[in-house]
Amino acid sequence: MGIWNDFIALIYPRNCISCNNSLFKHEEFICNYCFVNLPKSNFHTEENSELERVFTGRVPVVKAGSYYLFEKSGKVQKILHSIKYKSNKVLAEQLGIWYAQSLKDCTEIAKADVIIPVPLHPKKQKQRGFNQSEEFAKGLSKEFNIPLNTTNLTRNQFTETQTRKNKFARWENVEGKFELNNPTALENKTVILVDDVITTGATIEACYEALKLSPGIKISVLSLAYAKKD
């Protein structure tokens, strides 16, 4: 079996998603060097972190965290590109597992009641084949042993891409586009709302406008990456 695996590796080499160097047998997706040195935010260890300040006056978050800091043309961008454009769902889920392992001592996150990924519109999800936020959330859910809910919060209108929009335009693009189907199910619950990349926080804010219909709901936010808006 070892010889066969080595032969397969010659035909289909396993390379690090981040730096493209060859992976050792014990490494998955990302080499040990990149795993240690990729720019992690560690926002969950800070009081009133930069990410939490994004939501000040907009969303009363209990805790907000992002696994990585996004840098244009950097290694994190390569990881996000592999997930979004190469349909690397397994990588997204594994990143969720790794991130949850680093959050185990963050009680505000670890003791939440339910995890909800930011939904895609059904048309967009059909086009893409999957929701990258949901795949990332699956890893968080497995490692935390917190239930994943993908049906209560839904996206009811198809929106254009957010990439090139300014803060106000992003809000206009998502305002009123989310719907909570069963508010009583989340009453007095602590919810972890999960997105892939947070920039201005407009999508999270729009989700909160729907989620706050549940009396007593508390919101924490996690994302795969945080991209500071220039």
Image: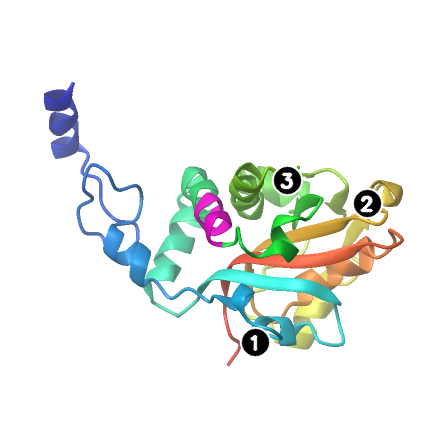
Residue at the image point whose x is 86% and y is 51% from the top: 214
* 101 drawn magenta: yes
In what element is the residue under mark 2? helix
Instruction: Judge from the rendering whether residue 148 lies leftward or rightward of residue 140; answer left or right.
Output: right
Task: Name the mark on residue 186.
Answer: 2
Q: How dense is the environment of label 1, judged by Cα within 10 Å: few (below 14), some, or many (20 and up)?
A: some
Quadrant for residue 145, please give it. top right
Q: Would you say residue 44 sits in the magenta stretch?
A: no
Judging depth in this view, the residue of 169 and 182 nearest the camera is 182
Is 73 rendered above or below residue 128?
below
Q: Is residue 43 visible?
A: yes
Dominant SS of magenta comes to helix
- Disc 1 residue type (three-letter): Glu
What residue would you read off at disc 3?
146
Q: Residue at x 14, y 21 (%)?
A: 4
Q: Is residue 26 left or right of residue 224?
A: left
Residue 19 appears in the picture as rendered: no
- Name the residue type under label 2: Leu
Q: Is residue 187 left or right of residue 102?
A: right
Q: Identify the residue position indicated by label 1 in the image.
A: 50
Which quarter of the rendered picture does the N terminus lie within? top left
Residue 210, given in percent of the width and then of the height, sits at 81, 55
The single residue placed furthest to the bottom in the displayed view is: 230
Given the image, on which type of amino acid does mark 3 rest?
Ile
Local secondary structure at mark 1:
helix
The residue segment tinted magenta is: 96-102
Of the numbered discs 2 and 1, the one sitting upstream in the chain is 1
Q: Nearer the viewer, mark 3 or mark 1?
A: 3
